[in-house]
C-alpha cells in the first residue's frame, strides 16, 4: 500500500513537472512571437513524461538493488552471528555444572579401569549406572559438537578454536571404548572420531 502511494505521488509530481515545462516553453515562445502548435506541445509533454519515467524507473531499480543487497548483507551478518552464538552455547554447555560432573565421573571410571580388557570394561560400565550415564552424556555432547562442526551449523573456526584440545584429550581417553563399540555399530560416535582425525 505504501509503495503504491509512493508511485502515485511520483507520477503526480512528474505530471506537474511536464505540465510546467510545456507551459513554460509555450509562454517563452509567445514572448518571442512564436506560437507553438498543440501537437508540438503534446509531443514535448509526452517526451518529458517518458524521459522522467525512464529516469525514475532506473533510480527505483538501483534503489531496490541497493536495498536488496543491504538486506542480503544483513542476513549474512545475522547468520554468521547466529553460528557464533551456537558455537559459544556448545562451549557453555560443555562447561556447565552438570556436564563437568559427567566429565569427572566418566574420566574417573576410565582411568580406574584402564587396565581392563575392552569387553570387560564395557560389561563393568554397563553395571555402573552413574558412570554409564556420564560416559553417554559426555560422548553424546561431543558428538553433537562434531555434527555442528561438520554440518556447518556453528561457526567452524570458533568451534575448532574452543574444542581442539578438548577433542584430542577426550578421544585419547575414550578411543578404545569407542572402537570396541564400533565393532557392533560402525557409526558409534563416528562424527566425533572423524573430526578428531581431521584436526590432528
Image (cartoon, grey):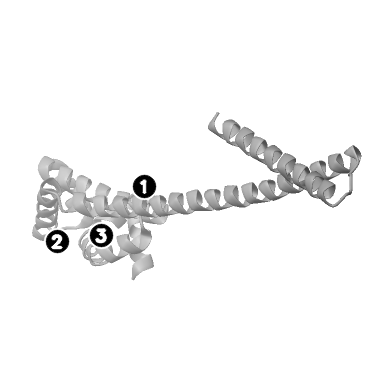
According to the picture, the residue beneath numbered tag 3 turns out to be 176
Q: Is residue 114 left or right of residue 143?
A: left
- Looking at the image, tell me whether mark 2 or mark 1 is earlier in sequence order: 2
Distance between mark 2 and mark 1 Cα atoms: 22 Å
Residue 102 in percent (x, y) is at 13, 48
Identify the element where label 2 is drawn. Answer: loop
Query: In the rendered view of the protein, which quadrant contains the N terminus?
Result: top right
Callout 1: 10 Å neighbours few (<14), some, many (20+)? few
Identify the element where label 3 is drawn. Answer: helix
Figure check: 170 above or below 188: below
Q: Is residue 136 left or right of residue 181?
A: left
Distance between mark 3 and mark 1 Cα atoms: 14 Å
In this view, the residue farthest toward the bottom is 200
According to the picture, the residue beneath numbered tag 1 turns out to be 185
Distance between mark 3 and mark 2 Cα atoms: 10 Å
According to the picture, the residue beneath numbered tag 2 turns out to be 114
Which disc is residue 138 wearing? none
Contact flag, marks 3 and 1 (Cβ < 8 Å): no
Residue closer to the observer: 99 or 32: 32
Q: Is residue 32 left or right of residue 13?
A: right
Q: How many marks?
A: 3
- Looking at the image, tell me whether mark 3 or mark 1 is earlier in sequence order: 3
Residue 99 in percent (x, y) is at 15, 49
Q: Is residue 10 left or right of residue 160?
A: right
The residue at the point 14 percent across, 61 percent down is 114
Residue closer to the observer: 4 or 15: 15
Residue closer to the observer: 155 or 38: 38
Residue closer to the observer: 175 or 150: 150
- Looking at the image, tell me whether mark 3 or mark 2 is earlier in sequence order: 2
Identify the element where label 1 is drawn. Answer: loop
Amino acid at each position: 500500500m505504501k509503495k503504491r502511494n509512493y508511485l502515485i505521488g511520483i507520477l503526480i509530481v512528474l505530471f506537474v513537472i511536464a505540465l510546467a515545462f510545456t507551459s513554460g516553453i509555450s509562454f517563452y515562445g509567445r514572448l518571442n512571437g512564436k506560437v507553438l502548435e498543440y501537437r508540438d506541445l503534446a509531443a514535448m509533454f509526452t517526451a518529458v513524461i517518458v524521459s522522467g519515467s525512464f529516469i525514475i524507473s532506473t533510480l527505483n531499480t538501483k534503489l531496490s538493488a541497493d536495498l536488496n543487497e543491504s538486506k542480503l548483507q544483513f542476513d549474512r551478518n545475522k547468520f554468521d552471528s547466529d553460528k557464533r552464538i551456537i558455537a559459544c552455547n556448545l562451549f557453555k554447555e560443555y562447561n556447565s555444572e552438570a556436564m563437568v560432573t559427567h566429565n569427572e565421573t566418566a574420566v574417573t571410571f576410565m582411568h580406574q579401569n584402564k587396565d581392563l580388557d575392552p569387553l570387560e570394561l564395557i560389561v563393568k560400565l554397563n553395571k555402573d549406572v552413574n558412570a554409564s550415564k556420564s560416559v553417554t552424556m559426555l560422548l553424546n555432547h561431543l558428538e553433537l559438537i562434531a555434527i555442528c562442526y561438520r554440518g556447518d551449523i556453528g561457526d567452524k573456526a570458533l568451534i575448532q578454536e574452543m574444542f581442539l584440545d578438548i577433542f584430542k584429550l577426550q578421544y585419547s581417553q575414550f578411543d578404545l571404548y569407542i572402537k570396541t563399540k564400533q565393532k557392533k555399530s560402525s557409526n558409534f560416535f563416528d562424527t566425533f572420531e572423524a573430526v578428531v582425525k581431521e584436526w590432528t
